[in-house]
Every structure is written in C-alpha cells, then in structure tokens.
Image (cartoon, rainbow, N blue to C red):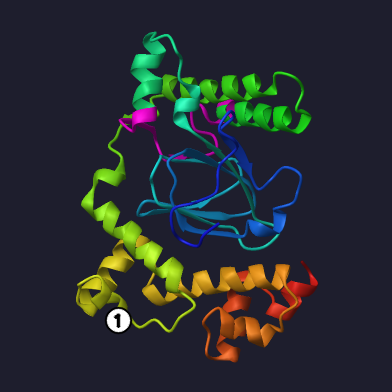
Amino acid sequence: MDAARREKREHGSASFPFQIYPALDGSEAQDSDFIPYHWHPELEIITVEAGHVSVTIADHNYEGEPGDVFFAAGEELHEIRAAGHENEFRSFVFAADFLEFTRADQAQSELLQPLAEGRLRMKTCMRCGEAGQREIRGLLAQIVRACNARAPGYQLMVKAALLGVIAVCAENGRLEQWARPASDYKAGQLKEIVAYLGEHFAEPLRLAEVAAHFGLSPQYFCTYFKDNFGKTLTQHINSLRIEQAARLLRETDLPVMEIGFLVGFDNFSYFIKRFRGVYGASPSGYRKGK
C-alpha cells in the first residue's frame, strides 16, 4: 500500500470487486500490523479478531476489542494499528455498486443505490454484544469460509452475505444519511496533507516547512493536525517511518542502521527506541522473529 494516500491497488478484480485483507492464505500476515491513513472508493468492513486494535475513521479513534465491527465508507480516511502478533484484524473491501440490482426494486432504490452513491452509510462502530453484531459476524464468517473453499458459486455466496450485512444494519437502525467527504473542502485538505506526508516522510520534515507548504501558520497547523488525526505531526511521521522500516526488515537484507537512515531517522538510538515502542522488539529482534 502507498503510505497514507489513496490506494492504487485493485481490490479483487473488475468482475469480482471484493477482497479480504490480510490474505487468507497467510501471505500478508506480517504486512498487517499498521495500515497508515488511506482512502479508496470502496466500502470497508473491519473486524477485530484478537487482542486490541486501534481504528481511526475520519477524525474519530476507536479502541477495538474482539468481536467489534467497524465500517469505513467510500473515500473516507481511515487507519488501522494492530502491532504485535497477539493483535489481529480482518478487512473486507468491496465496491458498493457490486451489490446493486439491474432491476430497480425497493431495496435497490432505498438502500443499495444510496450506498453506492454515498448518500447512505453504515454507522461506523458496532461493539460486541450490540444489536445485530452477532448476525453480522456470522455473515462475515460465511464469507471467509466461502473464499477459503472457492467452490463453484462462491462469489454469489459472498454477495448474498454482504447483502445480508446491509439488511441487518437496516433492521437495527444502523444506516444513516451521509455525504461523501470527497465533496467537502476540509476532507480534501486532510487528504492532501496525508498524501504529502506519505510521499515525503523519509525526508527531513519540519513543522514550519510543512505548515508553509499548505499556507498555514505552524501554530494553527499543529493544532489542526492534532484535532483531526488525534496525534502530533511528529508522531504521524514516526509511524510512517516505522511502518516502512518494518517492511524493509521483512523484505530485504539491508543492515538495520541503513534502514533507519533510509526511512528518515537521523539518530540510530532514537530509531531503535521508536521501533521498540511500536513492535515491542528491537529492529534486529523483529527481523529474527518475522
């Protein structure tokens, strides 16, 4: 994934625009600790499978526990943090128009079309034990089983289960009127900020310079960033650097010190400290245990 900007990957295929992350074959198991701020036109359902998972959607942060379900609408900024093997989540990403009917019946006109057009959304957070949560978790488990088995017609089983999720949300009052953030000036500016940081995080970045890039004073930018992302600029940049460092530790044989400098840390001791704070191990220890 491109760090902190609009995803360029295709979720599923044109004929079956649906994907589960991490991949069910285990190939992405190590790539799911931290998904930095990003957005995409598809809807996303995030489930907490084990431990504690921090989910930020728009400007709200949620501490998720096993059984919790979160919904990110199309074009909505979101971030997922699940550092450590004991903390696990699963994401179901799909295009809303994938579920639409050709024939314009009542479900199509009142639910599916408004969802696809961004006029309707599923409420963001569903905690374990809330009305409809068990049914939705059961439907998502059906999807996982279908995708694992890949028997003839499994695509239809996935589609039916996703329609069931929407039906359960409607039944339990968990659908609400909404407007896509893409048309909102503030949302657009936030996307520009995370895109810029996602492209330049490995470079020396100073608050005054970043603020000036967006035509804002350092003091205002500092407050604006913290209010909307729930963290300081430095914390966000460090997160991006640590995420990239972990990727390089997994995928390359580059020396640890070189990786620290490559991702933007100019102090090796500080790099180790920040890395340990996220993953609970030194970079070298993380590499040995990958």
Q: What quarter of the picture does the N terminus occupy?
A: bottom right
Question: Dividing the picture into quarters, in which one does residue 256 lie?
Answer: bottom right
Q: What quarter of the picture does the C terminus occupy?
A: bottom right
Q: What stretch is highlighted in magenta?
A: 116-135
Can the viewer see residue 175? no
Q: Is the residue marked by circle 1 packed among few (<14), some (14-19), or many (20+) residues within 10 Å?
A: some
The residue drawn where x is 38% and y is 25% is 173
In the image, residue 263 lies in the stretch drawn in magenta: no
Q: Position of residue 212 (x, y in %)?
A: 24, 77
User: In this rendering, would 160 be left or right of 107?
Assistant: right
Is 176 situated above or below 205?
Answer: above
The residue drawn where x is 76% and y is 44% is 25
What is the secondary structure assignment of the residue under circle 1?
helix
Question: Dividing the picture into quarters, in which one does residue 243 lie?
Answer: bottom right
Residue where numbered disc 1 is placed: 209
**Which amino acid is tagged 1?**
Glu
Q: Where is residue 183 in the image (x, y as percent from the top left)?
A: 25, 44
